[in-house]
Image (spheres, rainbow, N blue to C red):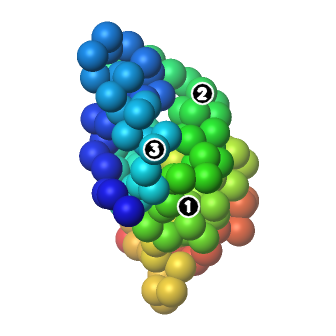
Amino acid sequence: MLAIDTNIVVRYLAQDHPEQSPRARDLIINNSVRLSLTVLLETAWVLRSAYGLTKQGVLDALEAFSGLPQVHFQDPDQIAKAFAWARQGMDFADALHLAAAQSIESFVTFDQQLATAAERTGAGPVRLL
């Protein structure tokens, strides 16, 4: 299994580079690949900020990518929770942070919107500081 970087995932999804995109596709199609939580988070950020995808577009692209049989995530249960919470309206990065903190007593933040979204989606204990 190969761990892949954000730029490989983005080139695969965007298919926007004449040399790198086909190489990324061949690597992913012909190998078992693993994405860390940080690569997934960075990929979502790049797709939104550099490629202008909507939140829905990012979720659609990442969920389709996660469905490929050769793609494996660092913690698939956390990723599934984050996707579900983001689909219910939570920011994807916040959902991923909360999913990674599920075994912790509470997630502490100044972000009122995050606390409200977490309560609405049942994403776990969030405490405002």
Q: In the rendered structure, are the residues bearing label 2 and label 3 in contact, judged by CB atoms less than 8 Å apart?
A: no
Report helix, strand or loop for mark 3.
Answer: helix
Amino acid identity at mark 2 = Gly
Residue 57 rendering spot, x and y as whole percentages: 59, 27
**Residue sitting at x 28%, y 46%:** 5
Q: Which quarter of the figure has residue 32?
A: bottom left
The quadrant of the rendering that contains the N terminus is: bottom left
Label 2 sits on residue: 57
Q: Nearer the viewer, mark 2 or mark 3?
A: 3
**Residue sitting at x 49%, y 40%:** 29
Report helix, strand or loop for mark 1.
Answer: helix
Q: Nearer the viewer, residue 60 or 82?
A: 60
Amino acid identity at mark 1 = Ile
Amino acid identity at mark 3 = Asn
The quadrant of the rendering that contains the C terminus is: bottom left
Residue 84 rendering spot, x and y as whole percentages: 69, 55
Q: Is residue 4 visible?
A: yes
Label 3 sits on residue: 30
Q: CA distance from mark 2 to mark 3?
A: 26 Å
Residue 14 rendering spot, x and y as whole percentages: 44, 21
Label 1 sits on residue: 79
Q: Is residue 110 visible?
A: no
Q: Is residue 61 above or below residue 79?
A: above
**Residue sitting at x 33%, y 57%:** 2
Give me the disc on residue 7: none
Residue 93 rendering spot, x and y as whole percentages: 45, 50
